[in-house]
Image: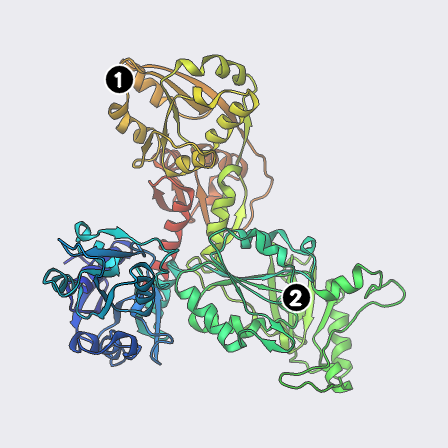
Amino acid sequence: MKKSSIVLKAGTRSSTLALIQSDQNRKRLENLFQFLTIDLVKFESPGDRDKIAELQTSSPDFFTKDLDNAVLENNIDCAIHSAKDLPYPVKQGLDWFWLPWREDPRDVIIVRKGYDTNSPVIGVSSERREQYSVKRWPNATLKSIRGNIEERIQQLDDGLYDILIMAGAAINRLNLQHRISEFIPPEEITPPEGQGFIALTFKENNPLFQNIRKYFSHSVVFAGAGPGSPDLASIGTLKALKNCNICLYDALLPIELLKFLPKSAKKVFVGKRNDKHSIKQPEITQLIGNLARQGKKVVRLKGGDPGIFGRLTEETDMLNMLNLPYRVIPGISSINAAATTTGLLLTRRNISRGFSVATCRQKNNKSFIPVNTEELNEFTKVFLMSISFISELTKYLINTGIEKNTHVSVIFNAGCVDQKIICSTLSNIEHKLKNIDTSDPGIIIIGKNADKKYIFRYNGALSGHKILLTCSETIIEKAATRVIDLGGIPICKPMISLNANSKIGSVLKNTIHKYDWIIITSPGSVRYFMEIISNESIDIRNIPKIMVCGTGTFEQFKKYNIIADAVAKNNYGSKGILDIVNQYFTKHSKILRLKSNLASTEITDTLSTNGYEINEMELYKNDEIKYYSVPLFDYVVFASSSAVNTFINNFGSDKLANKTIVVFGKPTEKTLKSYNIKCTLIVNTSSTITGCIDLLALYNVKSMIINN
């Protein structure tokens, strides 16, 4: 047994399929969280003992009951289930999540050898499979079938059935692919949402499993859609829509915003029309929690601003309770639209220097509810441009009768990456601000709502840490999106700018057809290469075969509908290319290496030394970006040696001392080590920038678990 600090008992059903899929996922978890050892404990559930009862009428926990009871009774730490077997809601006292490794979700057809009739006997185990069978084989006889996968196939081979419809995931996991006659397209028979996924159940409020879940969770995004016109939606909201799997949207918002969703994303209307909710609020809240635990990228799209009469806290409170990540993107409120777009401004110099906002309605009450003087005095108070008068303001409010211990929060640089929140009481806030730089713009909020307990939490795998991203602009947005998904705060400071080599276009146009292969090793190079192809009107049929380093560069080519012919998937950098050249090149191959001015010449030098005919051209230059101050950060990501050098040229090596640093590839690691910086160093040898962020998230989750 390997050395580990935590040993867990995981329950699993005792069927061959359950043991295989549990063991596969046990190994994956142990490989990720190497301080864990997971021992499998075999159980039966009612579905294993009772092989007569019809599945359609059986209890929801037919296949999970005994395992989940064992979790609740502390006999095991967690239970491993097929996600489609999990009852919703799960048993009281339990929590859960899906693991991300999905098998093929499609159903398959398995035909008995020698079957040759138009009136088959079909074994079915669900209503959706019955409906499909009736439509496809009108003359068929449908018979219910029970038993594990091997038992069902044996019944087929024994002649009790002619055709079976089963989950392809189960057949694949049992290595019985040779028995599959046909995959059924999902548009013909929709698989259950959980088919192919594995779920873990555990006792609620267990911090170990909540922290593990963080690594597999995406931040739920509560986004303001604005007051009605798509022109009044923020760029942040549009980015969130473009990056989600499922959007839960309200009424009274610009429906045109849904066009920004990916084609594969689901749209679910959860709004209110004519005082009737399509889904009641507790159901919406539960749905958000379920989707987040399934690992979905969820956008909850709310009209106007989510924080103004938007019932936001009911949904975020649930996520806080589950320790699930989320973030909020404010929107333009109808208040702003009604006032600012009409000229009926809420503040005018010498006329009005403030305003209150209220509603004359209350929950479940359609009558007019007036706002009395006492309530009006207790309204949350907001003061702008008043930090320099904090002493006079607090004394005045106390003198007017407001309690000294009334909550006060001061927000500096609201909504920016360097946002800072100082919380105290009316009598103490002046003292709390004495040793703080108050030169930045600040907003003062006073009242019950200013209590620090209401500040949104960062529950994600990166737990609100500020991640300094130094990579080039071609990949920094992708890195920032991943940081946000994992509950971190991206600070985008590219250290280099990429500038095209204006002289290469005509040269490449006249020579590209002479080469058999092109080597390209970065997404940035792909972008500039394809710009030249377009600008010079180069016939795409003249592009030779392409060798790339890593899936990031491969995916960049796919955006232009070009599939690279050779991909180095291991040992990111020159070594990855050199490891595979002999599989593709001959000594007669004519090779062109396209690179930046700072990229290593190792590939060209090595191939030339080994007798290959190779030339190289510079596609673009890396120019240093000058910064005069370094932002506050917790972790930093370097994707290249040039980014390391520029950072140190800008800020000095001491700014990296005792920091946690992720570097992209061995060359970048070597450059960083040359500065003899004492730090926690994580090396990403994969081929994507998001791989760097995932490593950082994994490091943070492990730290939370070990230090808990």
Which colour scheme appears in the figure? rainbow
Q: Regarding mark 2 in the picture, which secondary structure is present there?
A: loop
Q: Residues within 10 Å of mark 1 (few under 14, many from 20)?
A: few
- Please give the name of the residue rendered at 31% of the width and 72% of the height, measured from the top-left corner: 202
In the picture, measured across the screen, residue 187 lies left or right of residue 263, that is left
Give the residue type that dot 2 points to: Leu
Q: Which mark is residue 586?
A: 1
Decide which of 391, 616 is in the foreground and name it.
Answer: 616
- Please give the name of the residue rendered at 52% of the width and 25% of the height, measured from the top-left corner: 621
Question: Where residue 329 appears, x then y in whole percent?
Answer: 59, 60
Observer able to see residue 131:
yes
- Residue ID for mark 2: 252
Q: Quadrant of residue 335?
A: bottom right
Q: Earlier in the sequence, mark 1 or mark 2?
A: 2
Decide which of 441, 545 is in the foreground and name it.
Answer: 545
Question: Where residue 178 appears, x then y in whole percent?
Answer: 17, 49
Give the residue type that dot 1 points to: Thr
Q: Which mark is residue 311?
A: none
Name the image quarter holding the N terminus.
bottom left
Decide which of 570, 663 is in the foreground and name it.
Answer: 570
Question: Where residue 270 appears, x then y in whole percent?
Answer: 55, 69
Name the image quarter holding the C terminus.
bottom left
Observer able to see residue 708:
no
- Please give the name of the residue rendered at 21% of the width and 75% of the height, measured from the top-left corner: 47
